[in-house]
Amino acid sequence: MLFFNVRFKHLLLFFLLLMSSWVSAQDTKKSHTISGYITDGKSQETLLGASIYDVATMKGVVSNNFGYYTLKLPNGKIQFRASFVGYDPYEAVFDLRGDTLINIALTQSNQLNEVTVTARAIESNVKGTQMSTIELPVMQLKKVPALFGETDVIKALQLLPGVQSGTEGSAGMYVRGGGPDENLILLDGVPLYNVNHAAGFFSAFNSDAIKNVTLYKGNFPARFGGRLSSVVDVRMKDGDMYEYHGNFSVGLIAAKANVEGPIVKGKTSFNFSFRRTYYDLFTAPIMNYVAKQETGNKNSAWGGYYFYDLNLKLNHKFSDTDRLFFSFYSGDDKVYARVKIKEEYSDSYYNTGVNSYEKMDIDWRWGNRVAALRWNHVIQPNLFMNITGAYTQYRHYLGAEIGQERTYYQQGNTSTYSESIEMGLNSGIYDISAKADFDYNPFENHDVKFGANLTHHTYKPTTTGVHLKESDDDYQYSFDTVTGSSKIRALETDLYAEDNWSINNFFKLNAGLHFSTFTVEGKTYPSLQPRVSLRALVTEDFSLKAGYAYMSQYIHLLSSNAISLPTDLWVPVTGKIIPMNAHQVAVGAFYDWNGFEFSVEGYYKKMNNVMEYKDGASFFTLDQTDWQDKVVMGEGWSYGIELFAQKTIGKLTGWVGYTWSHANRLFNRPGQELNFGEVFPAKYDRRHDLNIVLMYELNDRIDLGATWIYSTGNCATLAYQDYHGLPNLSSYSYYSTIGHIESRNNYRFNSYQRLDLVANFHKQLKHCERVFSINVYNALVHNNPFVVIPWETYEYNPYTGETVEKKVLEQVCVFPIIPTLSWQYKF
Amino acid sequence: MKKQVILLMAMMMLGLTSCVKEVEFDGEQSESLLVVNGLQQVGQPARLCVEKSVFFLDAKKDCRAKDVQVDLYVNGDFKEALQVRDSILTEVYYDWTEEGEVMKERLLYAFNYCEGQYVLCAGDRLRFEVRSSEFDDAAEAETTMPDMPNVISFDTVRVDRVENTSTYTVYFSLTLDDPLGIDYYNLCPYDGLVGFSSSDPVFADLTSIEVENLMGESSEYYAYGPINVFSDAYFDGKTYSVSMSAYSWGDEYYEPFTLEVSRVDEALYQYKRTYDAYQQSDPESLLGMFTEPVRVYSNVKNGTGVVCAQSQPVTLVLDFIINY
C-alpha cells in the first residue's frame, strides 16, 4: 500500500505538471474548434481513424471510434484537409473565425487503394505517438488467403510481427510472449470472451459484419485496461443510410449472408449478418441413413457439429449532435448426437423374450452473446460523449442423457426394468457494464480522452448436475445431486484520462493514467497504471519512439495447452488468486519512403502473477478439486525485436514482418514451484517468425494473393530418457516406466512453414457482382506439426518370427492441403 | 489413444483429411542417466536397484550399467560396499510357429541389484555413492532413517451392513501422537485389510487414480498398494486420529484388519505424490492428453531415481465386531 501511495503521489505530480502545461499551452492568439462527423459519402458509414488537419501547420487529429473529430486551431486562414484510406481527400480553404461544424462525406477513390495496413497522415507510421499499433481495414483482408476461404480477422492479425498463433490453424493469439487470455478482444467496445469456433480453427468474427480492426500490442492508450498483452478493437459496420446492399457467399464449409440498408432514409440504418457451417446438414442424414440401413430401420443415429454467428447493428441519427447505436452479437458452437437402438430377442419354444430400447442424447454447446446500447452526444463542439450500456456473456453447457428400458416376458408375464442418467455441466461468465467516454479538445495541440467504466461480473466456474433413475417392477431408486464451485460475483471499476499532446514539431507525447479496482469475495484490488509514449520526429519521414505501459488483469483463462476447447474456463482473481500485472517498455524507429513503410521495434515485458496449471493438473473439470487448487502463480518475461516493412501503394502491395523473441516463465514461489523452481520457456516461445503477405491486382477482374509463413516450432515437454520406478511401490507398478523430464517445454516441434494462395475473379452480372475465389491453404503440403507424440508400435520380424516393440515419434498434421472454392454475390 | 482422439476430434469437427507421420527426433539427444532406486528400512540391510536410463525411442530392456560399485556411508563414515549382482526378470509367452504353439521366454527387465550387510538403525544418516564405468560422475543420494511412529490406538468406530449384500463397511481410526516438526507417515494394509478408502484431509495431497474420483462421485483416497503416505502438515505436534473405512466380506471370510504404520522420509512422500500424478499424465492415456506433464521427484544427484527410508513398522490388528 505504501508503494501504491508513493507511486500515486508521483503520478499526481505528473498530472499537475501536465495540467499546468495545458494552461501555458494556450496561445495568446484566440483559437476555435472545427468539429463534425466524417463519413462515407455514399452510405454515410462513419469512418474511424480518418485524418483531419491543417495542411499549412500539419496540426491535426484523427476521427474517433464513432467517426467524430474535433480540432482546435488558431483563428485565421485554414487549409483544411480530411483523408482516409481508399477515399479521395476533402480539402477546403477558409478563414476560421469561430467554432465551425463541418460534416465531411468522403467519396471512394477509383484509384488503386492504399491497402491493407494503413498509414494515416496525422497519426501515421512516422508521425503518430502510438507505436506497437496496427490497423487492418477488413475490406482488404479478403485479398489475403484464408483457411477454407473464410476471411478471418484474428488469423490476419497472426500475420503481423509480435503476434503468434498457437497450433496449426488455431485462432489463438500470443502477443509478445503473453498468454491467450491476455488479449482484450472488444466488439464495439464490449469484451468478447470466447473468440473461437471449432476448437480455434475459426474466429468468432464474420468479416462481412466488421468495419475495422485495430490491434494494440504494447504502449496501450490509457483508455484500455484489463489485459496484459494486447487489445483488439473490432468495430461493426453501422449500415448504409441510403441504399440496400448485401452479399451472399457459399464456401467449403460455411454459407453467409449480409444485408444492410436504411430503415428511415438518412436517419436509421441496419446491418445484419449471419454465418453458419452446413457440414452437419449433410453428415447427419447420411449417418442416420447408414444406421437405419444396417439395422433394418430399428436404430437411428443423428448427430453433427455446427457453429453460427449472427451480427446485428442498428444506428439512428437524431441530429448532428445525437446518435444511438444498438449492437448485438450471438455466436454458438453446437455438437449434438442422438442415438436410439432397439433390440428384440425371443425364444418361441420357451415363450420368453426381451425387448430392449436404448437411447443416448448429447447436447454440447457454447457461445457468446453481446448486446450494447450506445448514445453519442456532442456536448459542445470540442467535447464528445459516448455512453454505453452493455451485456456480454459466455456460456458453456454439456448435457448428456443415457437411458435404457428392457421388457422381459415369460409365459405371458412381463416385467420392465429401466435406468437413465442425465448429466449437465454448466459454466459461464456474465457481465453487465456501464461506460462513459469523453473526447475533449480543450486547447490547441491537446487531444484529451477521459472516461469511466463500471462492470458487474458473475463467474460461474463449473457446476455439474447428475440425475440418476433406476426402476423395475418392485424397486425404484433415484439420485439427484448438484456439485461444483459456487458463483463468484465481482465489481470492476475503471477511470482513465489521457492526453495526446503535440509539444512542438519535434516531440509529441501521449501520457495517461488508468486506475482500476476489482472487488471480489470482500477484497478490493486497486491498480494505478501509468501509460506514456513519446515520439521524436527526426525528419518528415523518420521518427523515433519510446513508450511504457503498466497493465493489470483480473481474470484468467484455465485452458488446455494445445487447442481451444469449450471447457476452457474464465475465472476471476479471488481472495487466493491475485491479479496479474505487466510492465512493458518498447522503443522503435519508423521510416516512410516512397510508398513503403519501415519500422523496427524492440520490447521488454515483465509479467507478474501469471498462472499455469500445476504439474499433473488437468483442465478436465469433472473432478471435485477447486480450480484454485490446480493452479500456481509465477513470473514471466519476454523480449524481442520486430521488423516490419510494407508497401501500401501500387498494383503489388503487402508486407513482410519478422520477429525475433524470447518468452520465459519462472514459478519458484514456495509451494507453487513448476519445473522445480527453474526457468523454462513459455509454451509459445519461438525464436523466429517470418510472414510475407503479397497482394497483386492483375486487372479489374482478377486479384491474387499469397502468404508465406515460417516460424520456429512450438515447445512441448518430452521425456528423453526412460527408467524404472521404485520397485514395490504398489502391486501394479513394479515394472512401471517413468519418463525423465529434464525440463518443461524442453522439446521443439519441427519448424512451421506454410504457403497459402488465393485468386479472386470478379464479374459484374446484371444485378450483382460475383466474386469467385480459389484458395489453397498450405499449397506446398508441408507437414506442419499439430502435436508430436511418442508412440509404441509392434513390428513383426520375419527372420526371427518375433514381434518386437518399437517406439516412434509420431507427428499429427491436421491440414496437409486444403483447396477451397467459394462464390460470393454482392448486390 | 491420444493420437486417435486428436484425429477423431479433427475429423469430427472438420471432416477433413489429416495425416500422421513418423518423424525423426531432431532434438538434442540427452545422455543416459544412472538410475538409483531403493526404499531403505530400519532393521534391514541397505538395498538398491541400479540401472541406466534408456533413450525414449529405444525399446531396450537390459538396463544394467557396467561395473557398478555402491558405497554406503553412515553418519558421514564409510560403512561398506554393497554387493552387486545382476537381476534378470523374464516372462513366458506363447508363439505360433510351424510346429504349433511354442512356449518362449523373453526378457522383461534387467538391472543391477545391490545389497549390504549392515543393518540399518533409526537415526542413521545414509549416503550412497554409486559408480559405473559408463558414467563419469558418481550418483549420490542421501536419506535419514526415521524413528517408529507413536501410535496411541487403532479403533473400530462403526460397522455398517451394506444394504442387500453380505458385506460390511467398517469405519476405523488410527490415533497418532505426532512430535513437532515435519513428519511423514505410511500406512500399509494387508491380510484382511486389502485396501481402504479415506476422505481424511491428511490424504488430500495424494492423487487417487480412481475413475470414480474423476467423474465426481467421490473425493476419497483409495489405498490398494503398500505405500500410502501422508504428512503431518494438518496436525503437526498434536494427537490426531486418521479416519478410514474398508469393506469386510462377512462372517465366512472374516479376517481381522491388519495395518502397518511407519514413519517415512520426505523423499518417499514427494516421490509417491509426483509418481501418482505422473501416472495420470501418461501421454498415451485419454486423460493424459488433457493433463500437464509431471516431473517425478528425484533425490539422486548426477542421476535420477529415489532413495528413501522407512522406519520399522508398528503392526496393528483391528478385531471388530459385526453388528447384525
Image (spheres, helix red, strand yellow):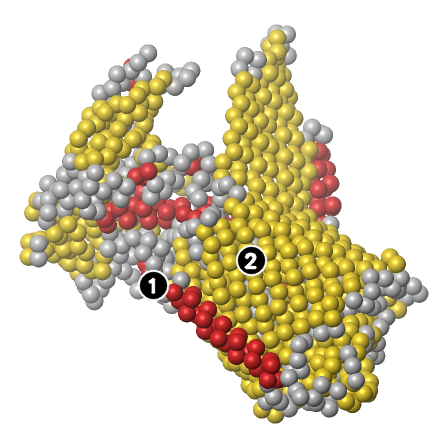
Q: Chain of mark 1?
A: A
Give the image location of residue B148, x and y in percent.
Answer: 14, 39
Give the image location of residue B140, x and y in percent.
Answer: 18, 59
Q: Residue furthest right?
A: A766
Kindly identify the residue that appears in the image at 29 percent across and 36 percent down: B225
Q: Quadrant of the C terminus of chain B?
A: top left
- Quadrant of the rendered image containing residue A41: bottom right
Query: Label 1: few (<14), some or many (≥20) within 10 Å?
Result: few
Kindly identify the residue that appears in the image at 69 percent across and 53 percent down: A371
Marks 2/1 in contact by CB < 8 Å: the verdict is no
Kindly identify the residue that appears in the image at 17 percent across and 33 percent down: B151
User: Of marks 2 and 1, which one's residue comes earlier in the chain?
Assistant: 2
Which residue is disc 1 drawn over? A678
- Quadrant of the rendered image containing residue A90: bottom right
Which residue is disc 2 drawn over? A493
Q: Nearer the viewer, mark 2 or mark 1?
A: 2
Side of B201 relative to A246 (left or right)? left
Q: Amino acid at mark 2?
A: Thr
Residue A199 in sight: no
Kindly identify the residue that appears in the image at 49 percent across and 66 percent down: A528
Give the image location of residue A158, x and y in percent.
Answer: 60, 68
Q: Chain of mark 2?
A: A
Query: Label 2: few (<14), some or many (≥20) within 10 Å?
Result: some
SS for callout 2: strand
SS for callout 1: loop
Side of A404 relative to B243 (left or right)? right
Q: Is residue A723 above or below residue A69?
A: above
Q: Amino acid at mark 1?
A: Glu
